[in-house]
Image (cartoon, rainbow, N blue to C red):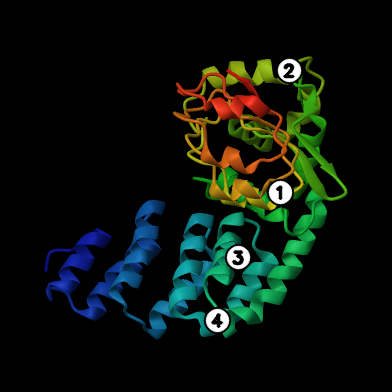
Amino acid sequence: MKEISKPEKIQKAFINGDLSKENAVEQLILLIEGSNNTEMRVESIKTLGNLKIYTETIFKTLENYMISDESAIVRASVVNYLIHNFLEDSLPALKWIIQHEKSPLPLKVIFDSIKKFDSPHLKLIKKDLTSWNESFSSKVGVDSQESKFFLDLEVLFAKGKRNYEIDPFIYKHFEELSDIKDGEPWLVIKNKHVEILNFNYFNWKFIKNNTDIVNSLSKLHDINVYLCSLRKYSHNDIIISSIPESIGSLIHLKKLILRRNGIRKLPISIKKLTLLKELDISYNKFEEIPDEINSFNRLETLNIKHNFIQKIPESLSHYIKVIR
């Protein structure tokens, strides 16, 4: 038989009856074990789930990769597969992941699974997750509920990286860095609650990737001028498609700056930010005033400069200072 080398071809051959269950599993495991292509390996793991084949060999092989694989992207994919297909058997390994994993990707999968599924088995690891989150929250300096947003930021920073590690202490640097235009630090935390968030994905990720020069950068008269000049010559990862939904957990937020992120809409959860007084969504790709604005009863200033917004509701400008 001609060797089938891609997961989609293996799946198609199995469904058509041209490939036995044993051969399909063997070829997919060979891809997971032997391919240098992370995307191919992840797709092979997903294909095992699509084929709904459950064997001891699959479990043992993937359990080993969940703990020891060099790629956090692969480990996260395995965690997702085992939770869906071998949850009870995977509990000891999942506990190990919670206690030892350094990448946010596998941990995020476990946190999301706890929210999605009402499983008695998942409840057995909820205590471990709570303990992890309390430790993470303490290091960031925020309430345990607000730490959800920071874990999602870690996931954003880890995107496409094999060996990214969580560094909760980096957020102390963001409290020290300021945008000279606004005169506010990138991050203000008071009494374990985030009150000001000045989030630009490129800027934050650059600092995250260059912690060794943070002290030098903090001495610059205007760090944003320097970062903007770097951004002009960067072609990768300069924008994000959306702000994490978990931003809704920052319920004490009073000022939110999302300038230059390339976003087109706000997450629905942002409606929970009822204390918000200032919102800056300038230099993005909005085509209309976000509906979520109507939820901000205390909003005083809205900056929408350099978007594609043509019309501003007349009622809005009656009680909000709109900068355009």
Of callouts 1 and 2, the N-terminal one: 2
User: What is the distance, in whole Å, between disc 1 and disc 2 at their CAs?
Assistant: 24 Å
Query: Considering only vertical position in the picture, is 320 above or below 129?
Result: above
Residue extending farthest right: 191
123 with respect to 65 (left or right): right
User: What is the distance, in whole Å, between disc 4 and disc 3 at their CAs?
Assistant: 13 Å
Q: Is residue 165 visible?
A: no
Query: Considering only vertical position in the picture, is 43 above or below 268?
Result: below
Q: Which residue corresponds to the image point at 52% horizontal and 19% vertical from the top-left?
A: 306
User: What is the distance, in whole Å, between disc 1 and disc 3 at their CAs?
Assistant: 18 Å
Please tell me in which quadrant of the rendered image residue 322 appears. Answer: top right
Circle 3 sits on which residue? 111
Circle 4 sits on which residue? 119
Of callouts 1 and 3, the N-terminal one: 3
Which element is circle 4 on?
loop
287 with respect to 216 (left or right): left
Residue 260, x across and y down, in percent:
57, 26
Q: Which mark is residue 250?
A: 1
